[in-house]
Image (cartoon, rainbow, N blue to C red):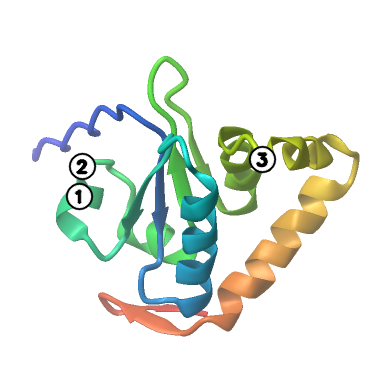
Amino acid sequence: MGRRRRPMRVERPTLIYDGECGFCRRCVALVQRADRGHRLDVVPFQDQERVARFGIPLPALAAAMHLVLPPPDGRVLAGADAAPEILRLLPRWRWLAGVFRVPGVRPVARRMYGWIARQRRCLVRGYAVR
């Protein structure tokens, strides 16, 4: 029986995104400009050496962005569920995180994120992402 690689210990919140998706790259660039305190690491999921340490399957990474939070939290949030936490990390945008507490906003955000994610086209190790 093979041993699973232990997930990497995260020092700062790490955003894993699709580095081949133009929309994703623009969104990450916007987040990086707003992250003046360098609270967030960003890694394209195509950087297999770095992302392998997180223990997240490649098809999941290809389907949605992931935010890996450092201990003691340690959560891994994907897609629209990562958005409010990313906003909380950015002082000028922190107030927008509260919008996700309004009833009905999260389900709508998840649907919108899913629709956007399906619009991009890429091929990752034989897994079509649509």
Most extreme residue toward the top is 72
* Vertical arrangement, residue 39 with respect to residue 60, above or below: above
The label number, if any, that marks residue 63 in the structure image: none
Asked where in the image residue 39 lies, by quadrant, the reply is top left
The label number, if any, that marks residue 50 in the structure image: 1
Distance in Å between CA atoms under marks 3 and 2 = 31 Å
- Viewer-nearest residue: 82 or 126: 82
Mark 3: give few (<14), some (14-19) or many (20+) Cα within 10 Å: few
* Vertical arrangement, residue 1 with respect to residue 51, above or below: above
Q: Which residue is mark 2?
A: 53
Give the mark nearest the N terminus, 3 or 2.
2
Q: Are marks 1 and 3 in contact (CB under 8 Å)?
A: no
- Residue 29: image location, x then y, percent: 47, 62
Task: Name the side, left or right, on which 120 lies relative to 100.
Answer: left
Q: Inspect the image, locate mark 2, and give the three-letter code of the amino acid beneath it.
A: Arg
Q: Which residue is mark 3?
A: 92
- Residue 48: image location, x then y, percent: 19, 59
Mark 2: give few (<14), some (14-19) or many (20+) Cα within 10 Å: some
- Residue 113: image location, x then y, percent: 66, 63
Element marked by disc 3? loop
